[in-house]
């Protein structure tokens, strides 16, 4: 009888231990705390904020041609607006939105606003950056418009390699300028 109880106890301990080691891998992301965001949640939050800000700005500034890009709650505004007051208004809309951190306003004033976004150029630049050593390309967002390449992100890894990649980007025929808006994170480092 004692050996049966001992065997039953050992079996129960084994089952409980197995369940506890497997449970942490089977927790649905939607059930975790909204205050602890992983990379996937951050990308979803950025996409939602980008969509909201784009909608609000296009409703309030219908004459303007503005592209909104969001990475880690940092907002990039590129394109053209009709007046300086529209440029300021677009930035103010973004600043007032809860959760936004920094606003990078690269809007230009033009009588006839337009913007030529090139996803193929952005993809080519991203490919060039990803070929560098120890760069986490999933943490980088590249946007190209009117020959200007904007690089945003944080915790990308090797910042020295990023600088080397940017030198290579300047050699691409469609690129006139590169704006590096990478925000240094706790996983970033340089090699001297």
Image (cartoon, grey):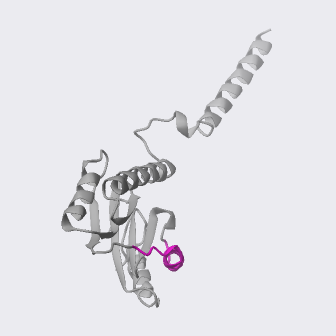
128 inside magenta stretch: yes
**Label total for image:** 0
By secondary structure, the bulk of the magenta-drawn segment is best described as helix
Q: Is residue 188 above or below residue 110?
A: above
Q: Where does the image place residue 48, in percent across and percent down from the top left?
A: 45, 49
Quadrant housing the N terminus: top right
Membership of 117 in magenta stretch: yes
> In percent of the image, x 63 and y 37: which residue is there?
26
Task: Decide if residue 114 is on the left or right side of residue 1.
Answer: left
Q: Quadrant of residue 185?
A: bottom left
Query: In the shown orientation, is residue 111 left or right of residue 11?
Result: left
Residue 134 picture location, percent across and down: 49, 72
Where residue 180 appears, as percent x and y from the top left, is: 34, 74
Residue at (29, 47) in percent of width and height: 97
Q: Is any atom of residue 184 visible in this view?
A: no
Image quadrant where residue 113 sits: bottom left
Q: Nearer the viewer, residue 65 or 97?
A: 65
Instruction: Give the magenta-colored segment's residue range.
Output: 115-134
């Amino acid at each position: 009888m004692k050996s049966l109880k001992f065997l039953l106890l050992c079996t129960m301990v084994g089952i409980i231990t197995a369940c506890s080691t497997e449970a942490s891998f089977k927790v649905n992301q939607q059930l975790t705390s909204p205050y602890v965001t992983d990379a996937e949640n951050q990308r979803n939050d950025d996409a939602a904020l980008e969509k909201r800000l784009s909608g609000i700005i296009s409703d309030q500034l219908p004459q303007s041609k503005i592209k909104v890009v969001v990475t880690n709650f940092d907002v990039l505004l590129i394109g053209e607006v009709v007046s300086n007051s529209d440029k300021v208004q677009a930035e103010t809309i973004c600043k007032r939105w809860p959760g936004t951190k920094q606003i990078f306003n690269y809007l230009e004033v033009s009588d006839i606003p337009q913007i030529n976004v090139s996803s193929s150029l952005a993809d080519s630049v991203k490919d060039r950056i990803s070929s560098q050593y120890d760069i986490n390309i999933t943490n980088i967002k590249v946007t190209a418009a009117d020959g200007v390449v904007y690089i945003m992100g944080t915790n990308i890894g090797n910042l020295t390699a990023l600088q080397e990649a940017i030198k290579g980007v300047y050699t691409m025929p469609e690129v006139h300028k590169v704006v590096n808006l990478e925000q240094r994170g706790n996983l970033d480092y340089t090699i001297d």
